Amino acid sequence: MNSNLLSRLINPANLVLWLVIVFLIGPFLIIVAASFSAGDTLAFPPQGFSLKWVYKVFTIESFQQSFITSMALAVGGTLVALALGVPAAYAMARYDMPFSETVRTIVSSPIIVPGIIVGLALLRYFVVPVGMSITLALFLAHTALVLPYAVRVVSASLNNLRSDMEEAAVLLGCSRAGAFFRVVMPNIKGGILSAFILGFVTSFNQVPVSLFLSGPGVRTLPIDMLGYMEIVFDPSIAALSSLLAFLSMGIVLLAERFLGFSRYV
């Protein structure tokens, strides 16, 4: 039994798999270990064990303010993206639109084009010449970045929903709008919630666009963390990074457990 187990572990395919796993989660484990260091500088291996840097994260005022900003952008931007994305996904799934593939490509462009280009474009052509506020530009950018995920995830739900259910409701006297809200929406709520979670996590952790559109008094948490590291190099950044990573993983795992998240993405 032991020899069989050993032979499977040293199998070349299994060795490659373990190397990939170590490569993927190794940096994360290093950051988690460094966040519990008792030393005063960010270093690995950690110098002893302490929770003081985890506690310190909750006492830094700039982190508190930027966390609220990131939460507002992530929640608000994702809700607006869903308000736009659900009807768009429904139209593409139920109607034979001209140039439908072109429309799909345009809708997906924010995730195809590098985020740094999106941020620079908004800064150069809206904020600077038009005088748009940084807050509004940042909100529009996050909404645009989340919109493709909303459309794609909801489209996957609609493609799995039989269209004759909706048609049956219309034949029985229900209006087209009523059929949408009474038949379609309840059956795709899992996809909508999955799209919200995916959009929220994407927006909250967004860096390139936020880097261009952050300004005095308006900074997201990832950008605030970058600025903090330019001045202070203590393990509090590692502690905050670990907390955010655990938060993101917890949200995704709960979504997979109760919504079947992997079916939509």
Image (tube, rainbow, N blue to C red):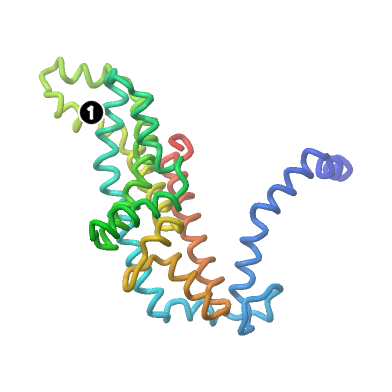
Check the image and report above or below for 91 versus 150: above
Q: Which element is circle 1 on?
A: helix
Inspect the image, locate mark 1, and give the three-letter code of the amino acid beneath it: Val
Q: Which residue occupies the extreme bottom position in the image? A: 40
Q: State left or right for residue 27 relative to residue 98.
A: right
Q: Is residue 155 above or below residue 133?
A: above
Q: Residue at x 60, y 81 (%)?
A: 50
Q: Quadrant of the N terminus?
A: top right
Choose between 12 and 165: the one closer to the eye: 12
Residue closest to the far front: 129
Residue 153 in view:
no
* Residue at the spot 46% in from the left edge and 50% down from the top edge: 252
Question: Quadrant of residue 258 in the image?
Answer: top left
Q: Is residue 245 left or right of residue 47?
A: left
Query: As rendered, which of 208 and 46 lies closer to the eye?
Result: 208
The x and y percentages for residue 197 are 39, 48
Which of the pair 77/132 is nearer the observer?
132
Q: Position of residue 57 (x, y in %)?
A: 47, 77
Residue in the picture at 48% in, 81% down: 56
User: What residue sits right under mark 1 in the picture?
Assistant: 183
Residue at far right of view: 3
Residue visible at 25% across and 62% down?
133
Image spot of residue 189 (x, y percent)? 31, 38
